[in-house]
Image: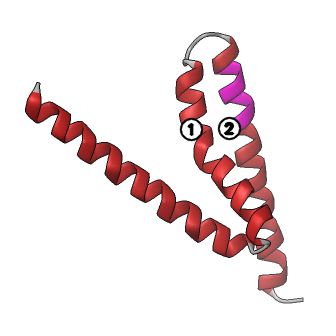
Amino acid sequence: MGIIEIAVPVVLGVISLTLLVMLVFGLRSLTHGKISPVTMGAIAVPLIILVVLGFVLQDWPRAGVYTILITLAGTILSMTLSSVKGLFS
């Protein structure tokens, strides 16, 4: 067995464990009032987009790329609208 066959499951396991810990501590911070529910919701939007696109497209890598592009477009739009708003106030 080569190093790739060992490394890929280990890396995926570490990534999964990291995401689980982030979720647990995010929920803990939410219940302790350290962050607002709006902030938690904004952080969850890309994950929701990914899950919806993954099930709709049945192609998870493509859903991941579309999620990144949609999130990037939303970020650019938000920054542009914020800048334009700053010009008029």
- Looking at the rendered image, the quarter that the C terminus falls into is top left
- Looking at the rendered image, the quarter that the N terminus falls into is bottom right
Does the magenta portion include 41? Answer: no
Q: CA distance from mark 1 to mark 2?
A: 12 Å
Mark yes or no: residue 11 visible: no
Residue bearing mark 2: 22
Instruction: Please tell me the numbered disc located at residue 43.
Output: 1
Give the residues drawn in magenta, as a range: 22-29
Answer with the quarter of the image where residue 14 lies: bottom right
Most foreground residue, 3 or 30: 30
Residue drawn at (57%, 70%) of the image? 65
Q: Position of residue 58 (x, y in %)?
A: 80, 72
Does the magenta portion include 24? Answer: yes
| Crowd rating for badge 1 (residues with CA inside 10 Å; few <14, some 14–19, many 20+) | few
SS type, badge 1: helix
Residue type of the residue flagged with mark 1:
Ile
Mark yes or no: residue 67 visible: yes
Q: Is residue 40 above or below residue 80?
A: above
Most foreground residue, 35 or 18: 35
Q: Position of residue 67 (x, y in %)?
A: 57, 61
Kindly give the residue lying farthest to the top in the view shown: 33
Q: Is residue 56 above or below residue 40?
A: below
Residue type of the residue flagged with mark 2:
Met
